[in-house]
Image (cartoon, helix red, strand yellow):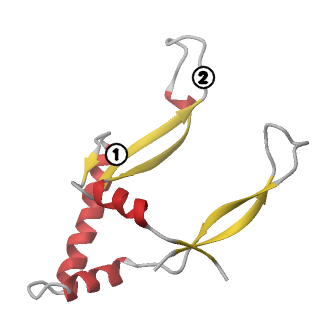
Amino acid sequence: MAVNYVLVERGNPGNPQAPKKFYAQAKSSGELTLRKLSREISESSTTVSDTDVLAVLNDLTKILKRHLSNGEIVRFGDFGTFQVALTSEGAETVDKFHASLIKNQKITFRPGIDLKEMLATVKYEKAK
């Protein structure tokens, strides 16, 4: 298998007069839902049902949400790490900063060794 990509023409925001160039952008070839994931995991194991796996994955989501909302980094071993990241407007002094200046937040994922190794060997094909 390969990751498909499409070409997208973009300008240079730092120099609007510069000629536009074409850049690769990954194109999805489908999706894997939590239900399908649980079924696939259960099919590779003879001891757990897809319902059991789905229940564990649903609990995992709840626990991940709880720990991230407490400001913790959640490490999933070789899978990777989840963490809350944010951006804010600046303040002239520490005393003038307040939480309402925080404007954007997101959850970042840093892949572990297994996923990094996959990225090093993945093949790419232009989407048809």
Q: Which residue is mark 2?
A: 90
Quadrant hosting residue 29: bottom right
x and y percentages locating residue 53 in the rendered image = 20, 78
Q: Nearer the viewer, mark 2 or mark 1?
A: 2
Give the Cα separation between the discs numbered 2 and 1: 23 Å
The quadrant of the rendering that contains the C terminus is bottom right
Task: Determine which of the numbered discs, if any, sits on residue 69 in the image.
Answer: 1
Q: Residue at x 53, y 19 (%)?
A: 97
Secondary element at image label 2: loop
Q: Determine which of the numbered discs, if any, sits on residue 32 in the image.
A: none
Picture coordinates of residue 18, whole percent (x, y):
87, 44
Circle 2: residue type = Gly
Where residue 12 appears, as percent x and y from the top left, is: 79, 45
* Labelled pair 2, 1 in contact (Cβ < 8 Å): no
For image coordinates 50% across by 29% down, the residue present is 99
Label 1 residue SS: helix
